[in-house]
Amino acid sequence: MQSAGSLRVGQRLARIRDSRLARQNLILFAGGLVAGLGGFVYHAIAGRVLGPATYGEVASLIALYAVGNAPTFILTLVLARYAATLLAHNNRAGIRSLLTRTTWLVAIPGLVALLVTGVLAVPFASFLHLGSPIPLLVLGFAIALVWQLAMPRGILQGMQRFTALSSNLSLEMVVRMSALVALLWAGYAVSGAMAAVVLGITAAYGLGLFTLRGLPHPRERARLRAMAGFSLTAAAGTLGVLLLYNQDVILARHYLDPHAAGIYGGLNKIGSIIYFLTLSVSQVMFPRVVEAVAKDQHPGRLLLISVGLIVAMGSGALIVFGLLPGLVVRVLFGAGFLDAVPYILLVGVIGIALSLDNLLVQFLMAVHDRVFVPILAGACALQAGLIVAFHDGVGQVVADTLFTLLALVAALVVRYLLLLPRLRPEMVVEEPLASPLKT
């Protein structure tokens, strides 16, 4: 016969298995896992084929792409929140209006990005010590295109169509990896690596529009001004986090010699494994916190559980990094990157710290707090300042980044503790989101 303890455990497992929320989390985690691993495999392939010096060019360009990708994450977050509200009011036609209006609106800054890239390609290529400005021109096109990808992805997330969103995330990286192998084999090197990024985005965008083809034609027009207030908060938080794990690679490329810059670029990607593996935790927590505050409940428990999940998941990777650093480097980047071995454990800690920073920022964004903005901006400035002042080798850049991220965790925890007793439902109240179309 089963003991009472084993029976209770079985009942809890059954509840988790039957939970819609658990299934959605699992689906989104699976897509995020494929996307995260695919992104890393992209770097591993490029590093092995191109070698540290040339791979350093790719790493710095991808870091620029990630910074330029900030509007994508901002738009995705804002549109997910907006679409979820429309769906709660059963306004699927309004969601189609949202898709159409934002697509045309975002096309304008996309064209501006292409023009700016064309003007700055040569001086930026000189700053990053690139062999040619062509990869930067391809990069500009990739950034303009990925901004458009935010529309279908944000709406899919807001509509809770997590299977379609998971497939979209996976397809982009599968196409990117496949195209990278073909283009490197054809001898296109750094330009080929950037073209592979463009092809992955194109495939995902096409799938996203196809998935949303069944939305009814609008009877109302989405009121985009309703998103303005939250957009500013989301922009500050998203851009700040992106800078924290990308500006160090860009600055390392400028200050370190080509080999050392390539080694640091590889370390950055190894540390970001933990960040991307735990990213789904913050994606799930964000709407749950909004709901809890709106209902005057207690969102602090959600944050504590999320912190526990990140620490638990990150600790497993950290153990591997600490016990088998040489194997990690050889498997992921090959023997050419063995100079990275002494720093593997430290970049694992960096990965956990970055994940916790992002989680706390997501919580504060969810409750429309704005005091975190100068705190996050200060951390970005601190990281850049430390690297500019102390860059005598890979170890110093690692230390600069680790100190910054741990200091930011402490500062954001203090802000959270001060804010928690003052949370009120009106902090997440929205104005009307749609108005009838004029005839």
Image (tube, rainbow, N blue to C red):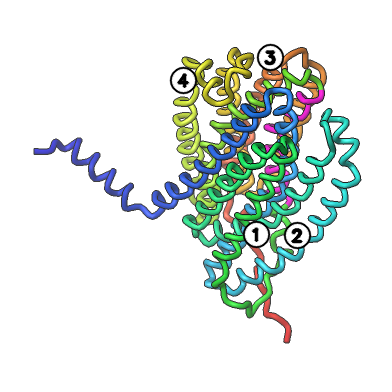
CA gap between label 1 and label 4 equals 39 Å
Q: Earlier in the sequence, mark 2 or mark 4?
A: 2
- Residue at 59% x, 42% y is 177
Question: On the rendered image, what quadrant is the C terminus found in?
Answer: bottom right
Circle 1/circle 4 CB separation < 8 Å: no
Query: In front: 289, or 120?
Result: 120
Q: Position of residue 5 (x, y in %)?
A: 19, 35
- Label 3: how many residues lie within 10 Å, few (<14), some (14-19) or many (20+)? some
Q: Earlier in the sequence, mark 4 or mark 3?
A: 4
Q: From this viewpoint, which residue is outermost toward the front?
A: 186
Residue beneath label 4, please? Answer: 319
Mark 3, secondary structure of its residue: helix
Residue that numbered label 3 is attached to = 395
Q: Amino acid at mark 1?
A: Met
Q: Amino acid at mark 4?
A: Ile
Tag 4 secondary structure: helix
State the separation of the CA atoms marked 1 and 3: 40 Å
